[in-house]
Image: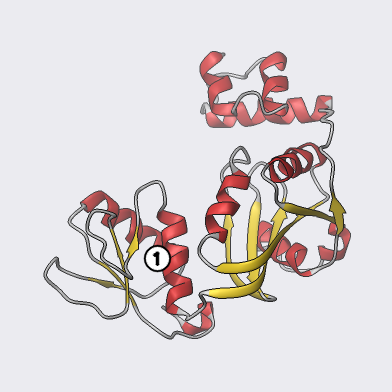
Amino acid sequence: MRDSDLGGVVRRIAVRTDDFRLSFHLMRELKRRKCDFVMLSLGDNWGDVLLTSPEEASDGEIPATEDTIEISVERAIQAAKGLDTAVQLVFGIDPGPRPGIAWLADGKVIGNAQLEQIDSIAEHILGLSSAVKHQRMSVKVGDGAPLIRDRIINQLILNGIETLQVDEYKTSIGSRMKAHLHAATRIALVGGSRVYNLRELHPTDGDLKEIQRQSRILSSGNLTISTELARMVAFGELSIEDAIKRA
């Protein structure tokens, strides 16, 4: 693990499992997070942070499955840094078809990610938040992309998460490289207005055309979903993948 990326290392991370697929996914995620790590043979002992399968995990080791790769690696990173508790966790979200997310513990950036879709963003955040014990958690959502913003806000409120909306004008300064991740970090760092009520969704013609454009991209140009299917996607009644299957 690199100190420059993760703010100082207390312990090292290793992977040890006889599940080849799990091992591959863990290695890929650790590399994506720019972590140095060790691959162990099954008989090797390890006294620092260890990622393994639930069936192989002993006390103090971090279990992972193919469905929990990102969350398990996040837990390993925080354990390696010696960060196991925080007073406040704050997540920032830059809304868009592939939203950027950044998360802070007591004001310090500890991770970021870009998601491929918005349908399970609240569950994703709850999973990430389980990596660090905390007293309070809030999520700040940028005010761009109104339809996607409001769908995300509704997800968060329905999951009982403290939600704030942030004026993205305050976050507009910065590099274009990895723009969504930088914006998400800035959103997490600035103040916002608390949102208490669910938002009514009002997809525009432009929103529907954008969803149709995404369907063409995802289907490699083979089809464009109908306006009605696009409307169902806009309201969160269908994922865009399911809409393509129905088209």
Q: Residue at x 65, y 49 (%)?
A: 99
Q: Percent from the top left, x then y, of residue 208? A: 75, 25
Q: Percent from the top left, x then y, of residue 176? A: 70, 62
**Picture quarter with the N terminus:** bottom left
Determine which quarter of the picture holds residue 50: bottom left
Q: Give above or below for 90 relative to 222.
A: below
Q: Write down the residue under mark 1.
A: 31
Residue 9 is left or right of residue 173, and the answer is left
Q: Percent from the top left, x then y, of residue 143? A: 83, 50
| Res 90 visible | no
Residue 30 is left or right of residue 135, and the answer is left
**Residue closest to the eye, 111 or 44:** 44
Q: Residue at x 74, y 65 (%)?
A: 188
Residue 71 is left or right of residue 196, and the answer is left
Q: Residue at x 14, y 65 (%)?
A: 42
| Res 1 visible | yes
Amino acid type at circle 1 is Lys
Q: Residue at x 71, y 14 (%)?
A: 228
**Residue closest to the eye, 220 or 141:** 141
Identify the residue at the far left of this view: 43
Secondary structure category for the residue under label 1: helix
Q: Give above or below for 97 relative to 128.
A: above
Coloring basis for residues: secondary structure
Residue 226 is left or right of residue 45, and the answer is right
Determine which quarter of the picture holds residue 218: top right
Q: Residues within 10 Å of mark 1 (few under 14, many from 20)?
A: few
**Residue closest to the eye, 109 or 196:** 196
Determine which quarter of the picture holds residue 206: top right
**Picture quarter with the C terminus:** top right
